[in-house]
Image (tube, rainbow, N blue to C red):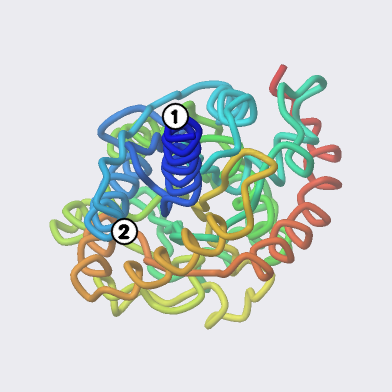
């Protein structure tokens, strides 16, 4: 009799312990954050700043896992294979979801099927800069000169996302400018400083020192609003090129099948930390805007950009494998 009672008590305690463990609030251990670029770049720095704030809220370490290559496809494939338990997060960019499906003949992940969307965490404005080999002092003059001398002016850019942004602007302005592709933003900078090209389209962070020194000059950005660190530089939208107002962005996703409660918690905590003035200032120093776009609007953004980018990628014949 006593033995049976003891066994029942032990069983009840074991059940209570297992239930408590199962219902323990997420996260209870370190979280992996996959970044599709190498350490030291803007995307990596953004991930580290944001994850530090999330780590403080969650009371758990967030480990940055850099997986560069294949226009973010390597990192995306790694994230797609992970368990949907909230302990693997992934930081895609526009091209991961809206360009790669059209530019790769065979993609190692499915953007719609393999991920749980959470939200956009930062926008990445691009800037059009020029050197002294370009007579134009403003973007309007640049457009005017391009129309007077079709195919003569040059505009350099880096990866495929920048190339597509450049193409959107050139079409919006209805001008014939020779686009010069480079492998990286650093190569674009070298091309500008060596006068190999007259103008370039690239991310904002590297350029303020050269703008202040007068070696280069800013013509416009493709941001929605003027950039705080460059208040005198107009946006393309201000200048009448509204179809070109499309900054690149970083988002956060998880493997498909993430429990709804965890998805909502991550989204709510991201929205809170991105509202922090301290974090906004840090992101601004990187040339990024700590912009939060929630899950539903994020899904709509991807759909809208995919509808634009798909035909453009095919028309330009961009192939990444």
| Residue annotated with mark 2 | 287
The one of 19 and 177 positioned closer to us in this rendering: 19
Residue at point 57%, 43% (across, down): 254
In this rendering, the answer to whether 112 lies above or below 129 is above
Q: Quadrant of residue 299?
A: bottom right
Percent x, y of residue 177:
63, 49
The one of 244 and 195 positioned closer to us in this rendering: 244
Instruction: Count the marks.
Output: 2
Q: Is residue 125 visible from the viewing direction of this image?
A: no
Percent x, y of residue 26:
43, 50
Residue at point 42%, 42% (across, down): 13
| Residue annotated with mark 1 | 3
Residue at point 52%, 45% (across, down): 155
Q: Quadrant of residue 118?
A: bottom right
Q: Is residue 48 visible from the viewing direction of this image?
A: yes
Quick check: 188 left or right of 222? left
Quick check: 30 left or right of 144? left
Q: Give SS at disc 1.
A: helix
- Tell me the distance, in whole angstroms, between the alpha carbons under discs 2 and 1: 69 Å
Quick check: 51 left or right of 5? left
């Amino acid at each position: 009799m006593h033995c049976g009672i003891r066994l029942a008590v032990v069983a009840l305690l074991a059940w209570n312990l297992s239930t408590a463990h199962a219902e323990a609030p997420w996260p209870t251990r370190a979280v992996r954050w996959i970044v599709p670029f190498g350490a030291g770049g803007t995307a990596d720095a953004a991930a580290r700043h944001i994850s530090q704030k999330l780590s403080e809220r969650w009371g758990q370490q967030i480990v940055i896992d850099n997986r560069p290559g294949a226009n973010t496809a390597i990192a995306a494939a790694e994230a797609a294979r992970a368990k949907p338990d909230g302990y693997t997060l992934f930081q895609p960019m526009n091209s991961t979801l809206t360009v790669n499906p059209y530019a790769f003949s065979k993609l190692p992940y499915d953007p719609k099927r393999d991920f749980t969307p959470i939200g956009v965490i930062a926008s990445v404005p691009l800037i059009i800069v020029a050197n002294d080999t370009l007579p134009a002092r403003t973007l309007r003059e640049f457009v005017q000169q391009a129309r007077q001398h079709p195919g003569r002016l040059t505009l350099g850019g880096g990866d495929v996302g920048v190339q597509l942004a450049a193409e959107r602007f050139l079409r919006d302005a209805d001008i014939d400018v020779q686009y010069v592709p480079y492998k990286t933003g650093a190569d674009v900078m070298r091309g500008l400083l060596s006068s190999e090209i007259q103008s370039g389209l690239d991310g904002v962070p590297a350029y303020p020192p050269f703008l202040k020194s007068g070696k280069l000059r800013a013509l416009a950005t493709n941001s929605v609003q003027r950039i705080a660190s460059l208040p005198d530089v107009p946006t393309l939208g201000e200048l009448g090129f509204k179809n070109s107002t499309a900054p690149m962005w970083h988002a956060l996703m998880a493997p498909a099948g993430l429990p709804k409660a965890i998805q909502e918690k991550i989204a709510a905590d991201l929205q809170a930390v991105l509202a922090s003035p301290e974090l906004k200032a840090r992101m601004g120093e990187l040339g990024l805007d700590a912009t939060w776009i929630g899950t539903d609007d994020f899904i709509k953004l991807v759909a809208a950009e995919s509808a634009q980018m798909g035909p453009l990628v095919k028309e330009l014949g961009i192939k990444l494998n």
